[in-house]
Image: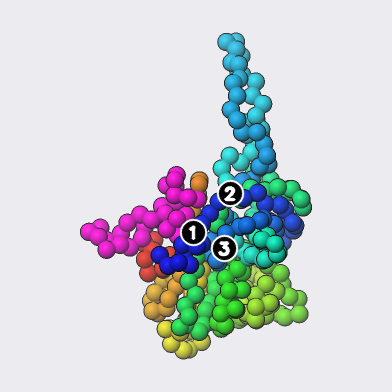
Amino acid sequence: MSPSDATTRRRGTFLAEVLANDRLCAEHGLLRLGVANFPPTRPGQFVQVQCCPPDKPDRPHAVDWPDDRPPQLTQPDLVRAEALLRRPFSLAGRRDLGAGRSELRVIYRVVGSGTGWLEQTSPGEPVSVLGPLGNAFAIREAKPAAALVGGGVGIPPMIYLAEALARAGKDTTAFCGVRARDLLPLTLTGDVAVSSAGEPSLCVAEFAACGIATALASDDGSLGLEGFAPEAFERWLGARGGSPEELVVYSCGPEAMMRAVGEACVARGIDCQLALERHMGCGMGTCQSCVVRIRADNEAGWTYKLVCTDGPVFDARDVLWD
């Protein structure tokens, strides 16, 4: 492990403050959290957020259980639909606020009680954050070109990575897929048309700010190419020319999407890094709930790895999908 890897593996629990909580689309929101002395982070890493008030009393207490009726439970985590476990979120960005404080950006999709609670938080409220967790995307100094392929809630880490690639001077193109126009967790620039053929343009503000052209695809055809992000990506691959050795591809999103991107890259000899997604109970390797099969030099030819600690970023050549 390199010194930089060792640095980014420091972690802790931090009490953050909500700076802003903005609706991005029908199901997604952008949470900006201010936090002091948060360890260094890199694109691809994630945090575990406690999706309930962090100052609630958590000390156990005895409850009488009468012989003739059920006990009267009053604890919020027992009587309300309250999230018991932290929820994992990829970092969508980070900004230095000065005096040791940082702004962490998290994009969430409202799907249950935990993210429903996040949606209701207001500026000034406290939120408990555990992190940073996991490994990060590697930026290849010798390779001048990069492609980002994100789908749905896999788009946020692509935003953070785009900023890092721009600073590194990489010639980068982005491909994003959503189910429908009203589920896009990004901002359209408005002055640049979105190509219905899946051709990249400066149509997405978050990527355009880094000088990165983006191709959009939607399942229902309501935005950009009717179809999936890997289709636009493979069209671009076929048209770009150049040596496969010059390009690095990064992807995060639905497993079927990442498999298509990974297999397309492996077949062409292109370096491809995938940020895998799994249900996580702890994010630190304790619960063993996020296993994935990874190629290994042993008799079986594979071994189990944990997405939370060994990943979430893996080389596409090493991931065994079946």
Residue 181 lies in the magenta-colored region:
no
Percent across and percent down for residue 202 are: 67, 80
Q: Secondary structure at mark 3?
A: loop
Give the residue type that dot 2 points to: Thr
Percent across and percent down for residue 199 are: 60, 81
Q: Secondary structure at mark 1?
A: loop
Q: Residues within 10 Å of mark 3 (few under 14, many from 20)?
A: some
Drawn side of residue 242 relative to residue 18, left or right: left
Q: Residue at x 56, y 54 (%)?
A: 131
Residue 9 disc label: 1
Closer to the N terminus: mark 3 or mark 2? Answer: 2
Q: Residue at x 45, y 83 (%)?
A: 142
For the residue pair 267 and 116, the one nearer the viewer reads as: 116
Question: Do labels 1 and 2 touch, CB within 8 Å?
Answer: no
Tell me: residue 247, above or below residue 79: below
Question: Do labels 3 and 2 touch, CB within 8 Å?
Answer: no
For the residue pair 301 and 101, the one nearer the viewer reads as: 101
Q: Which residue is mark 2?
A: 13
